[in-house]
Image (cartoon, rainbow, N blue to C red):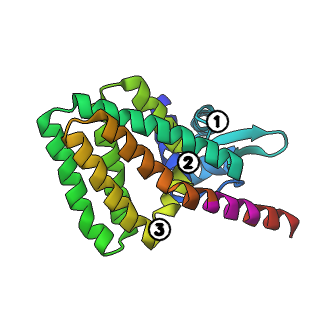
Amino acid sequence: MARASETLRRKLEGEINAGRLKPGDTIDEKSLAERFEVSRTPAREAIMQLAASGLVEMRPRHGAVVVGLNAEQAVAMMETLAILEAEAAALSAERMLPEEVEAMRALHIDSAPFAADLDSDGYIRLNHRFHAAIYAGARNAYLSEMLRQTRRRMAFYHTSSLYQKSRITRSLQEHGVVVEAISAGDPAAAREAMRDHILSGGRVYADLVAALQRSNEHRKES
């Protein structure tokens, strides 16, 4: 039963991150059980797991609703993410093994053709692996989990920002600066480069949140 609920949670989390389930959408326990051909118990448990991670909230008479962010919350989370990512990069500059540095560099190089072709889906996959490599190199499990939790809350909006052509090109350039700083074993430079990288996408991210919020408000009024 626990395995069924975990599998279902992962599927729902993927749909939220991909934007198939959007902020404000309701997740109904009965419909969920029928759709995935499971009993209502794992469906209920999956929803509760999503609520515990902050991706949905339980509302009276509405059930589970996919959580959205307002512009103020979006900026706050982006600032927090920048601090956490910057520290992970600084720790990686001190702790990454030479082979890990080369693996990180290879991910950066492999992502370049996707950026050149403006292939957002391909770039997003490599972007995820690039940042995951830095988390691993930091060798701080607690920091890594905080980063993953924060990114899960921001996933839909952050992923959407990388569908903007200018953001992909800029992101690749910023990754290059991060790679060089970590490769040089310079924690101060790595911290600054990663902080600049995350905050560089902050305006695009906040604009996307604000636009979606306006769309949801218009949908409620109509």
Q: Above or below — where is 111 with respect to 4?
A: below
Is 71 left, or right, of 117 in this rendering? right
N-term mark: 1 or 2: 1
Q: Secondary structure at mark 1?
A: helix
Cα separation, mark 1 vs mark 2, equals 15 Å
Q: Quadrant of residue 142?
A: top left
Q: Residue 199: give x, y in percent of width and height.
A: 50, 50
Instruction: Give amino acid for label 2.
Output: Met
Nearest the eye: 221 or 176:
176
Is 99 left, or right, of 95 in this rendering? left
Is 147 left, or right, of 42 in this rendering? left
Contact (Cβ within 8 Å) of mark 2 with mark 3: no
Q: Residue at x 36, y 50 (%)?
A: 128
Q: What residue is disc 2 on?
A: 154
Cα separation, mark 2 vs mark 3, equals 15 Å
Q: Above or below — where is 171 with respect to 3?
A: below
Which region is colored magenta? 207-214
Contact (Cβ within 8 Å) of mark 1 with mark 2: no
Q: Overall secondary structure of the magenta stretch? A: helix
Q: Residue furthest right?
A: 221
In the rendered image, the quadrant that contains the C terminus is bottom right
Q: Secondary structure at mark 2?
A: helix
Instruction: Give amino acid for label 3.
Output: Tyr
Q: Secondary structure at mark 3?
A: loop
